[in-house]
Structure formats: structure tokens, C-alpha cells
Image (cartoon, rainbow, N blue to C red):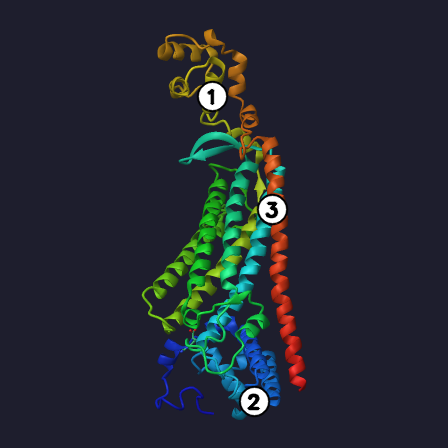
Amino acid sequence: MSNILRRGRLEAAQDEEILRYTSSMEADRWIFDADIAVDLAHTVMLKEQGIINREDCSKILSGLLKIRGEGMEKLDFSYEDIHISLESRLIDMVGEDVGGRMHSGRSRNDEVATCIRLVLREELTGLLEEIHELRQTLLTLAEKHIETLMPGFTHMQHAQPTTLAHHLCAHEAALGRDFDRIQDAYSRVNLCPLGAAAFASTGFNLNRKRTQELLGFAGLLENSMDAVSTRDFLIECASGFTNLMINFSRMAEELVIWSSSEFNFIELDDMYASTSSIMPQKKNPDTAELMRGKTGVVVGALMSLITICKGLPLSYNRDLQEATPNIWRSVETVRTSVRVMGGMIKTMKVRPEVLAAQSVTGFTTATELADTFVRETGIPFRTAHQIVGMLAREMERPTLEKIDSAAEVVLGESLSSRGLTEKLVKEALDPVSNIKRRKVTGGPAPEEMQKYLSKRQTELELNTQEIATLKDITDSAFENLLAIVNEYRKA
Ligand code: ARG
């Protein structure tokens, strides 16, 4: 049949190149199921409002279910997008007198915006579940390493001893905020633009509330012009994804460094490694490097989205079509990255002996020594800092004798005369007692870490329930929609 969209106003068909340039069919694979759900809900509502009759409704619904069963491949890819291709397939099946009624009071503008939101909503739920699992993986591993010493770094230089649990929990804390951001974005994705039509709504007596409920959305994007024009929800999600990937690039970077011969803190499982085509001995952390690299893809998608949306006048502009694939590309990259990161962490071999040995390299206990001077002798911290700084120049383990002679230079008196003892010095230089002392809220002391882990665990349990609620709402909306569709088909 002739092209149902162009046959009226336009004479010339598009040549191959223009069609490929303007078509969204390939990216629309993402929204095939959603588009059918939107068509089903819209048709049900049209019938309930008396805009189409029972028989036509029944035939349209049956046709749509058939198209869904056949799959996307059966559609005509010479159409410019899935919405019109699907409608054309329906008209082929049930005739124009019936199928031609489905698009009453609707535009592809509100249709596509609704589809994107439906799919993104599912993707976000999946992503939340995956982040949740990764956070659990990190907490479980942390639980095992509450006493595992390791060096902490600033400026990539050994700084102070900490524990592996403390380090892992730092990553988990960042992921917790990523989770919250995505959960928050979900609430603005989960709004329904359907019924806005092209932008000015419609003179048909639509019931927007009804289609919103049938599709399980929490509310409406009420202003019809805003509803079809905005892609702020894509920018918001892509920026949440970007934050997450920036955190991942930092984790990936550490996995790369930690598995080098210089560090030797961990060994990644072979599954995540590659070797060299020339150097037979090599075990390279390619998966972690690629994750660092894929961060660029996600950042790039955000930049594309922002740039495409910038300066667009109201209301719908075709530029918006170019925005959509960026969200699919980034959500796919992000979700895979979360799963892969979980796999790398779960399977990596940790070397506690290396971590512990390295925890004191580079005089990492210097801060605690200075703090001990302050607590035990009453000198100001800045003065203690100078004394320990002078001792650090020598790169040897400081003895009480050396401390005293440095103190003589700085203070004009020894610290042993102010109560400092060998025992106190020894304790300050011991990484285990360093850690034990750091029991300030959020510090690495084992007792504090235990408390922290159980707080995080409670939060994770709360998140489990929140995810289940999101799923329940959308699953039951979809079940309900299908039940109504089946009932109306019989009519
Ligand atoms: N493929 C289009 C998109 O993704 C669908 C909406 C087309 N609307 C239009 N008026 N041409 O944005």
C-alpha cells in the first residue's frame, strides 16, 4: 500500500539516503513493546470515552496483540518511525475503516514521549536493582576486611593507614548517592504525556487520567505543550548515569593500579583479564580499563543530549528524535558496567599480607605520632607537626631519642621531659592502634566500622522494599491493562 503518512500532503517519496538520515526505526527497537502498550491503553480509553465503538476497539486491540506477537521485524522499515509503521501494519490487518481510527486525538509527539518514559522507567528499575546488588557485594566484602590494614592515599602518596573495609565502604557510600539520584529521577520519568497530542491537546473528549493509570504512571505532565517538548528527564537521567560512571572510572582505575606488580594488592579473575599477542606473560586488566573508557561514552551521551536540547523553541522539534538514542546507549553501558563491576569485585583475589605490609610504608603513622605529642605533652599541634616533619626527612623509624633531639631544636626542651615515653611512641607507630583510635563517626576503627556496616545494611533493606514497590506498581498496571484488553477484545 502507499505510505499512509505521506500520501496526502507530499508527492515525492524519500530516497534511501534521506530516509536513513531521517528515520528512527533502528533506535525505535527499544520502544516496540512500549509503543504497543501505549496503543492498547489509548484504544481502551477511546472506547470508554465513546470516541470509537466496541467492535472497532475489539479489532484494533486484537490486531495490536498480533503485531506484538509477530515482533518488530515484521514491520515495514521504509517508514520514518515505529509509530507510523505500526499503524500502517494495523491498517493492513484490520482495514483503514477500523485501524485508521486508532490515532484519533493523538500525535506521534505525545506517543513517542510516552514510549520513552515507559522504557526508561523499566531500565531505571533494573539499574536500581543492579546498583543495589553491587552495594551489597561491597558491604559483604567489607564485612570480611574490617581488620585488614592497608595504606590510604592522598595525591597518590601513602598518607595514613586505614582498612580495606573503610576503603570499600567509601565506594559503597558514593554508589548509595547514585542510587538515590536515580531513584529521584525515576519520579520525574514516571509522568505521563499522553493526551497532549501534537502539543495543544485535542478537541476529542479524551480521559488523560485513564491512560495515565492504565500505563501505571504516577501522574500527568499536565501542560500539553510542555508534555511533548521536554526532554529534561533524559538529561537528568544521563547526568545521574554520568555521576555513577565517574565513580566507576575511579574504582576501575584502582583495580588497574592495584593489580599492577608495583601494588600487587589484588589479582583480578582471569575472566576479566586479557593477554598480549606478543608478550606471553601478560595478564592485563582490560575489562577495568574498558570501564574507565566507557565512562567517556556515557559522558558523551550527556553532552549530546544537552547540546541537542539547547535553544530548541517550543514545542516539538524533530531534533528531539536525535536525543533519544543517547539515553539508550548510556543506560545500556551503565547497566552492563554495574554488573561487570560486581563480578570483578566478587571474584578478585585480595592480598591482605601485601596490603598490611604496605600500610606503614612511607611513615604513614606520622600524623598519629604528632597527635600523640599533642595529647601526651600538651604542645600545640603545629609544633608537633614541625617536629615530626623534621624526623620524616630521615626516612627512618623515629626513636624517643631522635624525637627528643628534634624537639630540643624546635622547642628548646625534650618531649620525654613532658611525659612522652618509648611505649607511647611505639603505640603511635603501630598501624593497628592507629586504626583503633580512629573511632570518630565514619572512621575506620573496627567498632565504628561494625556500626557503620549495620546502618548501611538497614538502608539497603529499605531500598529492597522500595524497588519491590516500584515493580509492583508497574507490573500490576500492565497486568490490569492486559486484562481489560482481553475483556474488550471479546466484545
Ligand atoms: N521518531 C520521532 C521522534 O523520535 C517520533 C515523533 C515524530 N513526530 C513528528 N512530528 N515528526 O521524535
SS for dot 1: helix
- Lower sequence index among marks 1 and 3: 1
* Image coordinates for residue 89, horizontal then vertical, percent: 52, 85
Is label 1's Cβ within 8 Å of ligand 1?
Answer: no
Q: CA distance from mark 3 to mark 2?
A: 52 Å
Q: Which residue is mark 3?
A: 459
Mark 3 crowd level (few <14, some 14–19, many ≥20, 10 Å Cα): few
> In the picture shown, does residue 69 fall above or below 236?
below
Three-letter code, disc 2 = Met
Q: Are marks 1 and 3 in contact (CB under 8 Å)?
A: no
Residue identifier under label 2? 93
Closer to viewer: mark 1 or mark 3: 3
Name the one closer to the observer, 62 or 316.
316
Q: Is residue 58 left or right of residue 403?
A: right
Residue type indicated by callout 1: Asp
Which circle marks residue 371 in the picture?
A: 1
The answer to whether 395 is drawn above or below residue 53 in the figure is: above
What secondary structure is marked by label 3?
helix
Q: Quadrant of the C terminus?
A: bottom right
Q: Return the mark for residue 261.
A: none
Q: Earlier in the sequence, mark 1 or mark 2?
A: 2
The correct choice, above or below, for 351 with respect to 414 in the image is below
